[in-house]
């Protein structure tokens, strides 16, 4: 009797179903491997494919494109040198809705609420580059579009995807 | 609302992963398998509870898991197809003393696994003393001894 023919005794087999479930099993292993490999590239956050850079006017933002809910991530804002001894960073409303700010380094001198977002003013050395790091935790899942601007320049727009 | 959805997603995702890992993981559990299951529990636990350590959340989660488990068992009763999808089917590995090697390879069962079950369950020593060895749906191996085959007394030491 063929090894892969279904026996009826002592147990009732269904080798067609059995073979199909082996196939599903193998496909599942491939999927698990693919997910693990994809995670190494950073598509689930924290990897080379996740680190992104956006800029407009005097502002450049380095951020994590893929984030995970409740996990602390870092936004790095680089503001081009200017003549004044302060620098202003404007964060759009979406930023405040999406993230809980854990800390801002350095601490802003003032923090001004506006109709759309918040203006943070930092003490800065004139004619030198300024860097502001904001640590955040995502509160919501999904895609959100964020805008940020520096020193009344054009707004940089970028997206962030937060995994649940 | 959140915790119910999370619990449901985690329940089915874990079920799919465990199911795909094959029956061996469920049946003969080694010490390392046990550790693995502890780690799986620990990894998922915080994702489900999040930062909500309230009693309400804990009870909601427990209720959801038990409810899903009951729902699956009812579906199993109703439909043989669902039963097979959820629990796999029994499969013969040894037939009248002959190993069905193709099946064993695909189910990741070795001759040693079968001999071990034969020794433990019936004190048998060789494959030809086995009439049927069956990989059960739960993942364990059961043995039907060949007629006339009986446990021999262990040799005196």
Image (cartoon, rainbow, N blue to C red):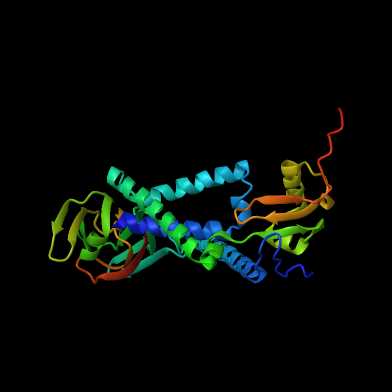
Residue at position x 72%, y 46% from top? Answer: B117
Q: Which residue is outermost to the top? A: B157
- Is residue B37 something one can see in this rendering? yes
Where the N terminus of chain A falls, by quadrant?
Answer: bottom right
Vertical comparison of B14 with A1: above or below: above
- Is residue A150 something one can see in this rendering? no
Residue at position x 43%, y 63% from top? Answer: A50
User: Left or right of B100: which side holds A131?
Assistant: left
Q: Quadrant of residue A91?
A: bottom left
The image shows residue A105 at horizontal and vertical percentages of 28, 50
Camera-side residue of A136 and B50: B50
Q: Which residue is outermost to the front? A: B147
User: Left or right of B110: which side holds A42?
Assistant: left
Residue at position x 34%, y 53% from top? Answer: A70
User: Left or right of A75: which side holds B111?
Assistant: right
Where the C terminus of chain A falls, by quadrant?
Answer: bottom left
The image shows residue A55 at horizontal and vertical percentages of 32, 69
The image shows residue A89 at horizontal and vertical percentages of 22, 61
Q: How many marks?
A: 0
Vertical comparison of A39 with B30: above or below: below
């Amino acid at each position: 009797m063929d090894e892969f023919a279904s026996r009826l005794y002592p147990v009732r087999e269904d080798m067609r179903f059995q073979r199909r479930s082996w196939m599903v099993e193998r496909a599942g292993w491939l999927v698990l491997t693919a997910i693990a490999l994809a995670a190494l590239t950073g598509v689930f956050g924290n990897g080379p494919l996740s680190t992104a850079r956006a800029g407009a006017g005097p502002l450049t933002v380095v951020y994590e494109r893929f984030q995970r809910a409740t996990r602390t991530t870092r936004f790095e804002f680089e503001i081009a040198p200017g003549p004044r001894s302060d620098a202003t960073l404007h964060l759009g409303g979406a930023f405040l809705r999406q993230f809980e700010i854990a800390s801002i380094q350095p601490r802003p001198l003032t923090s001004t609420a506006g109709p759309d977002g918040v203006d943070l003013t930092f003490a800065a050395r004139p004619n030198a580059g300024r860097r502001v790091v904001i640590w955040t935790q995502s509160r919501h899942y999904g895609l959100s579009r964020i805008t940020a601007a520096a020193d009344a320049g054009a707004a940089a727009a970028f997206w962030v995807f937060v995994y649940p | 609302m959140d915790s119910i959805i999370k619990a449901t997603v985690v329940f089915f995702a874990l079920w799919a992963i465990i199911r795909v890992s094959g029956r061996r993981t469920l049946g003969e559990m080694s010490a390392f398998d046990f550790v693995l299951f502890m780690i799986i529990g620990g990894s998922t636990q915080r994702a489900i509870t999040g930062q909500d350590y309230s009693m309400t959340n804990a009870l909601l989660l427990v209720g959801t898991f038990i409810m899903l488990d009951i729902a699956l068992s009812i579906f199993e009763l109703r439909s043989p197809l669902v039963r097979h999808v959820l629990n796999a089917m029994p499969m013969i590995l040894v037939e009248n003393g002959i190993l069905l090697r193709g099946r064993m390879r695909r189910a990741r069962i070795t001759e040693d696994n079968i001999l071990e079950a034969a020794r433990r369950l019936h004190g048998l020593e060789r494959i030809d003393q086995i009439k049927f060895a069956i990989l059960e749906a739960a993942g364990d191996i059961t043995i039907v001894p060949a007629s006339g085959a009986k446990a021999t007394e262990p040799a005196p030491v």
